[in-house]
């Protein structure tokens, strides 16, 4: 899964933007500077507790999470500088954190495990422990609590197709593959670990009626038009909730979980433990359903990500 973000969100970025006008990193009200943009919110607090810099990668979900981190910290009395739209290539934002260019940012357990540590997934608990311990010992970076939201690879279909072919899991998909047309994104068709070859290795052959690669976002349009029966998705995509899609269970655990969590420089937490308490409160309530809803508000309904983030925090009683 190391290439997940770069291939689906970066390599296909321009293609999807032209075709759909709805690429994840180019939505209404979002940062557009490729190298990252730094700004302090006009509504920022006075900063009586000090100044922090919150980072985020270059796609919608990261903007949303980074903004919620920033709003919570401002609400508690910190002055916050936002540095969003940093490259999705994990070494870039990882180095920014280590070098003190940012103090914290949202990351995914699966990305850290496979891309930074080059380890294979065992189970959710083991994966998180491995990531947390390695980051602390090697770089003095602290993983806080994970959110339930899991932005892993998945395969989805419509309820009508799921009912017709009796699809609830990836094992079911393997059994009915010869009757189904399959659409993938990025390098999924050839990626040996987490793409179609990985599916074959774990579940057995998938002799699809047809299988091809399309730009990110195109797979949803094709699925809804009846041009495919199964498509590759990411677990917190807004389209899943907006179109009431069925996500097939990865019953043999091919893909590691990609749980969201704040990573914070330990030196920052040493000065103020309240930061961890604030961010952990948020992580508890960011579920798949909540993340899908927020993503769709931005990518589907074209609301500015900052507005969506603030509305969620207010609704959950975390913002004064």
Image (cartoon, rainbow, N blue to C red):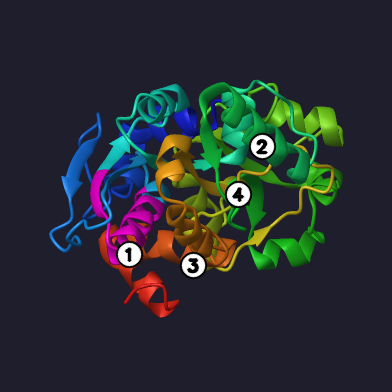
Q: Residue at x 47, y 52 (%)?
A: 273
Marks 2/4: CA–CA distance: 9 Å
Q: Which mark is residue 76?
A: 1
x, y percentage for residue 212?
Answer: 58, 33
Nearest the eye: 120 or 100: 100
Q: Residue at x 45, y 61 (%)?
A: 278
Secondary structure under badge 1? Answer: loop
Residue that label 2 marks: 210
* Residue contact at pointers 3 and 4, CB within 8 angstroms: no
Q: Quadrant of the C terminus?
A: bottom left
Residue that label 3 marks: 242
Marks 1/4: CA–CA distance: 48 Å
In front: mark 2 or mark 1? Answer: 1
In front: mark 2 or mark 3? Answer: 3
The first of marks 2 and 3 along the sequence is 2
Q: What is the span of residues highlighted in magenta in the rendered image? A: 63-82
Q: Is residue 138 left or right of residue 38?
A: right
């Amino acid at each position: 899964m190391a290439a997940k973000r770069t291939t689906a969100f970066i390599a296909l970025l321009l293609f999807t933007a032209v075709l759909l006008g709805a690429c994840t990193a180019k939505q209404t009200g979002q940062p557009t500077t490729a190298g990252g943009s730094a700004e302090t919110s006009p509504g920022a607090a006075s900063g009586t507790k000090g100044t922090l810099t919150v980072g985020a990668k270059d796609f919608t979900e990261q903007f949303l999470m980074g903004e919620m981190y920033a709003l919570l910290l401002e609400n508690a009395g910190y002055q916050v500088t936002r540095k969003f739209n940093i490259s999705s290539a994990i070494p870039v934002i990882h180095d920014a954190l280590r070098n003190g260019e940012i103090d914290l940012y949202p990351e995914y357990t699966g990305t850290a495990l496979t891309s930074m540590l080059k380890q294979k997934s065992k189970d959710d608990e083991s994966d998180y422990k491995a990531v947390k311990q390695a980051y602390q010992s090697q770089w003095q970076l602290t993983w806080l609590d994970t959110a339930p939201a899991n932005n892993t690879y998945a395969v989805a279909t419509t309820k009508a197709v799921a009912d017709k072919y009796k699809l609830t899991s990836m094992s079911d998909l393997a059994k009915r593959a010869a009757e189904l047309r399959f659409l993938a994104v990025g390098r999924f068709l050839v990626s040996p670990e987490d793409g179609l070859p990985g599916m074959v290795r774990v579940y057995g052959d998938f002799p699809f009626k047809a299988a091809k690669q399309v730009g990110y976002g195109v797979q949803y349009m094709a699925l809804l038009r009846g041009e495919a029966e199964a498509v590759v998705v990411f677990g917190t995509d807004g389209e899943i909730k907006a179109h009431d899609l069925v996500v097939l269970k990865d019953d043999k655990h091919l893909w590691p979980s990609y749980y969201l969590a704040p990573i914070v420089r330990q030196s920052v937490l040493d000065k103020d433990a309240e930061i961890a308490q604030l961010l952990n409160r948020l992580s508890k309530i960011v579920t798949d359903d909540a993340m899908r809803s927020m993503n769709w508000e931005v990518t589907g309904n074209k609301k500015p990500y900052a507005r969506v983030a603030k509305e969620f925090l207010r609704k959950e009683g975390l913002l004064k």
